[in-house]
Amino acid sequence: QVQLQESGPGLVKASETLSLICNVSGYAISSGYWWAWIRQAPGKGLEWIRSIYHSGSTYYNAPFKSRATMSVDTSKNQFSLKLSSVTAADTAVYYCARETYGKVEYWGQGTLVTVSS
Amino acid sequence: QSALTQPPSASGSPGQSVTISCTGTSSDVGAYNYVSWYQQHPGKAPKLIIYEVSERPSGVPDRFSGSKSGNTASLTVSGLQAEDEADYHCSSYAGTNNLIFGGGTKLAVL
């Protein structure tokens, strides 16, 4: 069974960089599929941020083009997200997930990141 | 790309059927048969219940069905049960490097 688990600081100061890691078990990232970060602000809908393939190829949601970067470490079977210059608007539950053509089949449990001033 | 449009709320009584719409454009919902639906209970991660417009993952009851006409996709929940009360989100692949979600619909079982 594919399982994903997010980890990282729950509190980040405004203007700093949010860093999250997703550990994957039950499936080797190097075997395929796209791996994504999706967030949900309190009381709001889901928002896709960026996706990465095991080769390192990525694609992104335009609003995050310059702020969000992803990397993958196949030896640790994990991938990561860095979101720079955060503001209060970046306060959200961040989910890591496995997706293909928009079908997000596996999700992590989510981690709440609060941006403080 | 703008978010897909969903009604903020929907409701039905136990045993009834309810349909939730998801409207996009000819660049996303209308262009691809890659519409998915997710069920999300409070404090939980979303769960995939429909993919590729009308396909159900293993274990999802056949009370959940999906369809699409033009730029609008729909999720129908038949034989409503108390445990169906949740938020429902739609998503669509939108071509080169794009995944779009709807704003979500809160379904109440009265």
Image (cartoon, coloured by chain):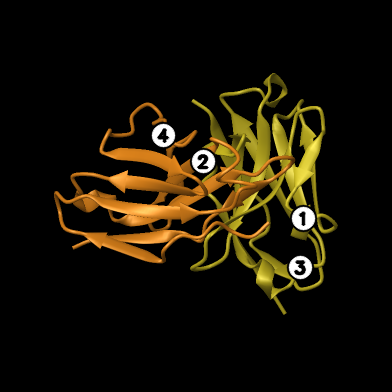
Of the pair A117 and B72, the residue shown nearer to us: B72
Question: In the rendered image, which quarter contains the N terminus of chain B?
Answer: bottom right
Looking at the picture, how far across and down is residue B101, in whole percent? 56, 53
Number of the label disc, if any, that sits on residue B35: 2
Residues at circles 3 and 4 in contact by the CB criterion of under 8 Å? no
Which residue matches tag 4? B54
The amino acid pointed to by label 4 is Ser
Which residue matches tag 1? A62
Q: Secondary structure at mark 2?
A: strand
Separation of residues labelled 2 and 4 (CA atoms):
8 Å
Which residue matches tag 3? A86
Label 3 chain ID = A
Label 1 chain ID = A
- The colour assigned to chain A within the rendered structure: yellow
Question: In the rendered image, which quarter contains the C terminus of chain B?
Answer: bottom left
Looking at the picture, how far across and down is residue B9, in whole percent? 36, 65
Residues at circles 4 and 1 in contact by the CB criterion of under 8 Å? no
Q: Is residue B58 visible?
A: yes
